[in-house]
Image (cartoon, rainbow, N blue to C red):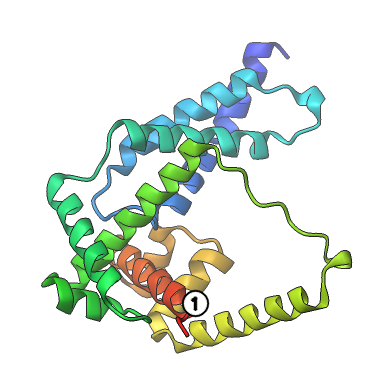
Amino acid sequence: MTEQTRRDELILSHLGLVRHVIGRLAAQLPAGTDLENLESAGTLGLVEAASSFDPSRGVEFRAYAYGRIRGAVLDELRRNCPLPQNVLERVARVRRAYERLRPPVTVEALAAATGLTSDEVSDSLAAMRMTRMMSLEASGEPAQPRSDRRSERPEAALERAEQKRVLAAALAALPERERLAITLYYLEELRLKEIAHVLHLSESRVSRLLSAALFQLGEQLRPRES
């Protein structure tokens, strides 16, 4: 097999990975984002990954390509910010209202404080997550290493158990559709299109459900002032 043939086979057999990466990012993007443009960028990332892949290093190609594809998509988002001025203005309004409200803040409370609809608030929250995600990627901030639980302090284990309990309670408190959307997205790893089919909703509605659910979970886990 020639090098060119090997490269072409890697690309063709992993085109689905591009759609998977974008599908996983889609819930963190505002409604109306040009996903076809991102898919083109992700495909270029896949081509670059196939060209530079060295199988002798013992790394699986799928894992290697995933990072290259995701990076190419985020680079495209940074180069061509999909947020128009009116969305940026809504984001600023939501952020100011959030800082004024006492926790736990709800989407409904933000809508009342800003005069926006719940859908507009959800889109603004998604935009805020997207800009934060791109900022972290651009900074090269390393992922936090997992601690060795064998040497973990007893109080740390108790804290982790309490966090799990609080998270489980927060999930249980979500409306049924939001809870199901979170479960399908994070546990079953379905894409927005697949979740939309299961819930008989549009992809934009599923995106907003996930955005609202993630925000509510974050608020439930947010430290309270004493």
Image quadrant holding the N terminus, namely: top right
Question: In the picture provided, is 33 more to the left or to the right than 133?
Answer: left
Q: How many marks?
A: 1
Q: Residue 11: tell me if it is visible.
A: yes
Tell me which residue sits at (49%, 35%) in the image: 71
| Rendered location of residue 170, percent (x, y) | 50, 83
Between 97 and 122, the one lying in front of the other is: 97
Question: In the picture provided, is 152 more to the left or to the right than 51?
Answer: right
Between 193 and 212, the one lying in front of the other is: 212
Q: Residue 204: tell me if it is visible.
A: no
| Rendered location of residue 203, percent (x, y) | 31, 61
| Rendered location of residue 73, percent (x, y) | 43, 36
Say if 141 sits above or below 164 in the image: above
Tell me which residue sits at (38%, 31%) in the image: 40
Between 213 and 181, the one lying in front of the other is: 213
Say if 16 sits above or below 169 in the image: above
Q: Amino acid at mark 1?
A: Pro
| Rendered location of residue 44, percent (x, y) | 46, 26
Q: Which residue is mark 1?
A: 223
The image quadrant of residue 212 is bottom left
Tell me which residue sits at (17%, 58%) in the image: 90
The image quadrant of residue 163 is bottom right
Q: Residues within 10 Å of mark 1 (few under 14, many from 20)?
A: few
- Residue extending furthest right? 150
SS at mark 1 in the image: loop
